[in-house]
Image (cartoon, rainbow, N blue to C red):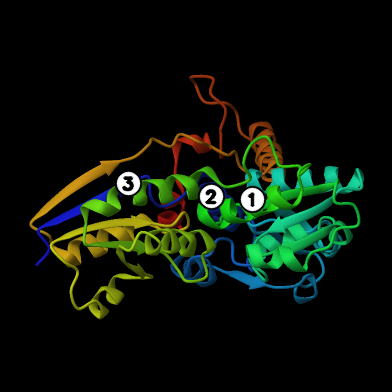
Amino acid sequence: MVDNLIVINPRGFCAGVEMAIKALSWMLKIFPTPIYCYHEIVHNDWIVEVFKKNGVIFVESPQEIPTDSVAMLSAHGTSPEIKERFLKKSSIMIDSVCPLVTKVHHEAKTLSEKRTHIIYVGHSGHDEAVGAMGVAPKSMTLIESPEDLNKFIPENPNKVALLAQTTLAISEWDNILERSKDLYPNLIVPRKSDLCYATTNRQEAAKEIAPEVNTILVVGSSTSSNTKALVKTINNLDTEVYMLNNVDEINKIKNLGKRVAITAGASAPDHIVQEIINKINPKKIEYFINTEEEEYFPLPIELRKIYKNTEVLLNQIFPKSKNNKSNRIFANDREWTATDALVAL
């Protein structure tokens, strides 16, 4: 029996995931299905299944979509070449890339134009890393560990930069950063870290609470890089940690201990967290807040333009209401959440 369960905040959806889920949900409302999405919209099994059931087909190549179809690009970012191919083949294409990933793409493009070689710290094969490496493939080398740096021989050691996949564990980045500084005294690094604020916040919160508990439960899917980074961070603290994709997986844990904490990766829906809390049924629930997150990313500009044009058309067809308010079909998306959007499907 668990005596105390500590619910960690912040946890769950980040601003980029919120934006991407809301965008794809609204596409299902205004376009006929199927809608084709390049990569999983976010790396969470439950969310992907919800969208599949509602007419979204997830693909790994522009070759998989029919000509003149409706397409969305995932939150993880897409290389310029692949994006151009989707643009040519689809009738409508919406890019739901996270703005923090866009920042890294812009940095890679700018540095490559200055003939600087870029060490990109990321996970080989991950959707975000694939997209970023495609920005300037001839000027970038993927590194996954400090040991990989020994195999990297730059053409000009004085023109080397270091960029990162946004969802890394802090320790992964720090270890490679320190080793790179030793190797390249003139190393170029971004003024503001490439690491996602949400990924960092969840790791820092877990580190702060770890000494007070026997076990930490991390809700999220095994495909989620930031969830795995969170688990890795806790593992490094010698605290018992379990990754749970759904409530049923709690049954595989024989002994949670008396004091347990629960958190969630940036793409994990909170209803799964609540289901697990109910399943554990602790004697007491406490809440720990490490920091407040107020970040907001607007819907993709292409989608906002479509909404605006549709709103103008409807106002031409239908008169304004008596209080002189327009017939808006698109309320301020700050007023509703990704959870609201998923429930409405």
Q: Is residue 11 visible?
A: yes
Q: Position of residue 199 (x, y in %)?
A: 49, 50
Residue type of the residue flagged with mark 3:
Glu
Residue type of the residue flagged with mark 2:
Lys
Residue ranking furthest to the top? 323
Q: Which residue is mark 3?
A: 208
Say which of 122 and 43 sits in front: 122
Mark 3–mark 1 CB contact (< 8 Å): no
Mark 2–mark 3 CB contact (< 8 Å): no
- Tag 2 secondary structure: helix
Image quarter (top left, top right, bottom left or bottom right) of the N terminus? bottom left
Name which of mark 1 and mark 2 comes first in the sequence. Answer: 2
Mark 1–mark 2 CB contact (< 8 Å): no
Q: Which residue is mark 1?
A: 177
The residue drawn where x is 71% and y is 61% is 71
Q: Is residue 12 above or below residue 316?
A: below
Q: Which residue is mark 2?
A: 22
Say which of 297 and 151 sits in front: 151
Single out the mark in the foreground, 2 or 3. Answer: 3
Neighbourhood count class around disc 2 (C-alpha, 10 Å): few under 14, some 14–19, many 20 upward: many
Q: Position of residue 168 (x, y in %)?
A: 56, 56
Neighbourhood count class around disc 3 (C-alpha, 10 Å): few under 14, some 14–19, many 20 upward: few
Residue type of the residue flagged with mark 1:
Leu
The residue drawn where x is 32% and y is 58% is 271
| Left or right side of 338 for 106 | right
| Left or right side of 188 for 315 | left
Determine the CA span between mark 1 and mark 2: 35 Å
Name which of mark 3 and mark 1 comes first in the sequence. Answer: 1
